């Protein structure tokens, strides 16, 4: 069995918080869609990345319930771990760079899975939401903390019935929000994870954050770290 690196992506300035991510550096022991979905479900992280070619950055992304063509925090984390200038996802090529303590990628908003971006009147209203709020479908609840400075408070609720109640840090939703607002954002999500974004040329969105290696698992061992 392949070993699994567990990262935390979009950490706060003290390297706390962040969304847990499993990265299977050698995906050959998991050759089928079902074997990958089953491992992702067993690990229980919001996403798990399977690396099919580490030199070319070819990755395959799974939630506990299925495959994603693209996702933000898996790409930020995988780019940091593999130290490559580009990732090849099912949605397209994702450019990557390291800048001091931050790992950055560029992606297109249309690659992100649909989410409802629901604005609330204050950060306190977002904080007070139950987990998950009533309703169906992926919800990204947000409010301005400081509109002039581009500071946002957000929480994310997949509401897809696969055990992930709240997502600690969600890159794809942050990309969608940045595209909708057309400006750079500093997002505080979940228990305090930090996501930085900025719109770029040709419809690209840059998104970045701090990444740390949390631990390494044997492929046969169950995970015990919550994803958010």
Image: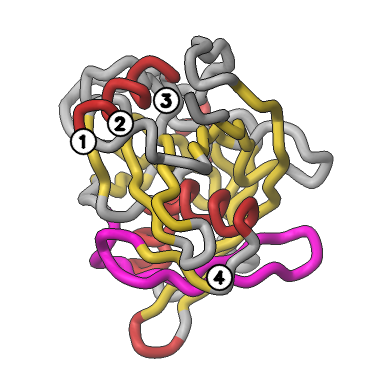
Q: Say whether residue 51 is visible.
A: yes
Coordinates of residue 146 in the picture (x, y in percent): 61, 57
Quarter of the image for residue 30 reads: top left
Relative vertical location of residue 51 with respect to residue 43 in this rendering, above or below: below
Relative vertical location of residue 202 with respect to residue 55 in this rendering, above or below: below
The mark lying in front, picked from 3 and 1, is: 1
Q: Secondary structure at mark 1?
A: helix
The residue to which callout 4 is attached is: 96
* Mark sitting earlier along the chain (3/4): 4
Q: Secondary structure at mark 4?
A: strand
Q: Residues within 10 Å of mark 3 (few under 14, many from 20)?
A: many
* Mark sitting earlier along the chain (3/2): 2
- Alpha carbon of mark 2 to alpha carbon of mark 4: how far? 25 Å
Q: Which residue does the image show at 50% across and 21% down from the upper left?
A: 219
Decide which of 58, 171 is in the foreground and name it: 58
Q: Say whether residue 173 is visible.
A: no
Q: Is residue 104 magenta?
A: yes
What label sits on residue 36 in the rendered view? Answer: 2
* Mark sitting earlier along the chain (2/4): 2
Residues in magenta?
Answer: 89-112
Coordinates of residue 180 in the picture (x, y in percent): 33, 67
Circle 1/circle 2 CB separation < 8 Å: yes
Q: Quick check: 224 left or right of 115?
A: right
- Alpha carbon of mark 1 to alpha carbon of mark 2: how far? 5 Å
Q: Secondary structure at mark 2?
A: helix
What label sits on residue 33 in the rendered view? Answer: 1
Decide which of 113, 140 is in the foreground and name it: 113
Circle 1/circle 4 CB separation < 8 Å: no
Quarter of the image for residue 62 reads: top left
Q: Residues within 10 Å of mark 4 (few under 14, many from 20)?
A: many
- Alpha carbon of mark 3 to alpha carbon of mark 2: how far? 22 Å
The residue to which callout 3 is attached is: 166
């Amino acid at each position: 069995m392949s070993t699994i690196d567990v990262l935390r992506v979009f950490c706060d300035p003290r390297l706390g918080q962040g969304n847990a991510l499993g990265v299977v550096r050698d995906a050959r022991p998991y050759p089928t869609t079902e074997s990958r979905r089953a491992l992702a479900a067993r690990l229980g992280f919001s996403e798990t990345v399977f690396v099919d070619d580490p030199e070319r950055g070819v990755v395959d992304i799974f939630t506990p319930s299925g495959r994603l063509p693209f996702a933000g925090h898996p790409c930020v984390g995988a780019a940091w771990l593999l130290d490559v200038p580009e990732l090849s996802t099912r949605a397209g090529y994702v450019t990557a760079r390291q800048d001091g303590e931050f790992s950055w990628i560029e992606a297109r908003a249309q690659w992100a899975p649909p989410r409802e971006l629901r604005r609330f009147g204050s950060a306190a209203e977002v904080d007070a939401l139950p987990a998950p709020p009533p309703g169906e479908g992926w919800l990204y609840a947000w409010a301005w903390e400081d509109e002039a400075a581009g500071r946002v408070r957000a929480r994310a609720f997949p509401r897809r019935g696969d055990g992930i109640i709240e997502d600690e840090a969600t890159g794809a939703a942050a990309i969608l929000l940045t595209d909708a607002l057309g400006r750079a954002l500093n997002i505080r999500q979940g228990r305090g994870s930090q996501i930085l974004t900025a719109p770029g040329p040709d419809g690209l969105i840059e998104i970045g954050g701090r990444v740390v290696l949390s631990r390494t698992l044997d492929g046969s061992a169950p995970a015990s770290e919550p994803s958010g």
